[in-house]
Amino acid sequence: MVRFLALVLAATPPWASLEASQRTRAMVELKAEPWPGRLARAAAPFLGTPYAVSPLGEGEGHDPDPRLRLDAVDCVTLVEQALALATAADDGALIETLDRVRYTGSPSYGHRNHVMEAQWLPHLLQLGWLTNVTRAYGGKTTQKVKKVITPVTWEGKLGRSLGLEAGDQARGAFELDVIPAAHAVSALAHAPDGLVLVVVRSDLPSMVTRISHVAVLVQGPSGPMLRHASSAQHLVVDQLLADFLAAGRQATWPLVGLAVYEPQEPRRPGPER
C-alpha cells in the first residue's frame, strides 16, 4: 500500500496564507537554519498545497502565468520557490531571487531553464545553488547515464509542446550520475533532510529529457521520504521513497534511479545572457 503523510504542521502555516511582513519574518528565521535542512524547512509550509501543471510563467507573452505563486505548485516550482524562500533576504527580494533560480538571463520564456539535465541543473550548479553529491551517497553503485538532444529530438511531442525558438533549444550530450532505483533507499537511509532528488527515467529518443520529477528528501519514521508535488495525489505530500520507486519501476516510462544534489547558499549573480 502506498503511504502518504500530508500533515501541515501547526508551527508552519502555508506560505500562501502569510502577509508580506509575516513571510519576511519566516524567511529571516529560515536563514538561521543550516543547509541542507533549510530547504526541507522551506518546503514544509507547502505541504497540502494544491498541485497545478506549470503554475508559473513570465506574467506576459508566451506564458502569462505569474512569476510567483504560493497557492499552487508543480514539482519543479515547489523546489524553485523553496530555494528562493530559503535564500532571499526578505519578501521584497523574493521574485528577483526566484528569477535567478528559473532563468539564465532576464525573465523571458526563451531564457527559462526548461530542460532539467541540459539547463536547470547546469544553471544551479554553476551558480553554486546545488552541488552534485550523487556519488557521495551512491558509492560504487552509482552509474553514469547520458541524454543526447538533437534537432530531431525537439520534433517529438514534448519538444514541440514547449514552443521554443530554435535558438533557445538546448542541444548536445548531457551526463548525469545516478543511484540505481534498487539501491536508492539504502543509499539515502541516513542522508540529511533537504537534499534535492532528481528522478531519472529510461532514455526515449523522442523525449527532450530523461528527468520526470524533482523533490526534496526528508527522513520519516519509516525511512527516507519525498517531499514533493504529487500529480497522483494532487497535493504537496511526504511520500515514502520506497513506495515511489516501486511504482516508478513498473511505469510505462521506467524509472532508472535518482540523481542527488545538496543545496547551499548561491554565489553572487553573474552577467545576464
Image (spheres, rainbow, N blue to C red):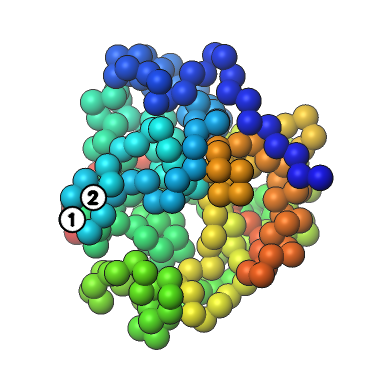
Left of 121 or right of it: where is 203? right
Above-or-below relation of 34 to 66? above
Left of 168 or right of it: where is 180? right
Q: In the rendering, at what x and y percent does residue 103 appear?
A: 28, 52
Residue 205 numbered mark, or none = none
Q: Which residue is mark 2?
A: 64
- C-beta proximity under 8 Å, tags 1 and 2: yes
Q: Quadrant of the C terminus?
A: bottom left
> For this rendering, which residue is in front, 66 or 249?
66
> For this rendering, which residue is in front, 146 or 92?
92
Which residue occupies 68% across, 32% down?
5
Which residue occupies 76% across, 48% down?
242
Measured in 3D between alpha carbons, the distance from the residue under mark 1 to the one under mark 2, in whole angstroms, is 6 Å
Tag 1: amino acid = Gly
Q: Which residue is mark 1?
A: 61
Left of 217 or right of it: where is 207? left
Q: Secondary structure at mark 2?
A: loop
Above-or-below relation of 183 to 267? below
Tag 2: amino acid = Pro
